[in-house]
Amino acid sequence: MGLDDIAAGVEVTTEQRDRGVATVDRTEQSLAARLDAVADELPCSGEAAATVVERYAGGGSIGVAARTADVAPMTAAKTLHLLGESVSPVGPTGRDVIEDYLAGELPRTDARQLARVSETEFALAVYVETHDPLPEARAAIEDALAVDAETDPLAETRSETADLL
């Protein structure tokens, strides 16, 4: 008996509906409108910042988010940093080297070599160390991307950190 014999007469009588993933957006304004309030402090417009956030939050890289928003990748990285995302290209030791450079204890070429980064990565690391994220901008994107734990359709699929042990 083969698979054809086993499957003979089997037919699909119902179809599954694709409902997507439900999210809860407790805001009445668009993300771009909320980011317009802090656009003067961002390196791009509120509309471009919203596009960067949406594409990045959707799983795109900084480069993809930048191309989608029609801004430079460095501008997208700076925007994400100001919105509270961790985009620093250096680790803790690299941050110490950047701090020494900013304090005038190391020349730029030595600091870049010790941090083991390219010129572009070095520039971003310096920017991250010299600019704090904007709390009001972070609040705008948190509200836009918030998922209510009680109505989250994927809540039961997530494991607790204790499950990793």
Image (spheres, grey):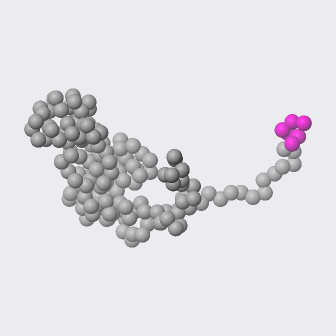
Residue 35, above or below 129: below
Residue 117 point in image, percent of width and height: 26, 32
Residue 15 appears in the figure: yes
- Residue at the image position 22 percent from the left and 36 percent from the top: 122
| The quarter of the displayed image where residue 136 is located | bottom left
Residue 64 point in image, percent of width and height: 38, 43
Residue 101 point in image, percent of width and height: 14, 37
The mark total stands at: 0
164 sits left or right of 10 in the view: left
- Residue at the image position 30 percent from the left and 54 percent from the top: 84
- Residue at the image position 53 percent from the left and 67 percent from the top: 151
The N terminus: image quadrant: top right
- Residue at the image position 20 percent from the left and 36 percent from the top: 97
Residue 20, above or below 93: below
Q: Residue furthest left?
A: 104
**Is residue 50 rendered magenta in the image?**
no
Residue 70 appears in the figure: no
Is 10 in front, or is 71?
10
Residue 83, above or below 71: below
Q: Which residues are magenta?
A: 1-6
63 sits left or right of 105 in the view: right
| The quarter of the displayed image where residue 3 is located | top right
Is 59 in front, or is 112?
112
Q: Residue furthest right?
A: 1
Main secondary-structure element of the magenta-colored stretch: helix
Residue 37 point in image, percent of width and height: 25, 65
131 sits left or right of 164 in the view: left
Is 34 in front, or is 81?
81
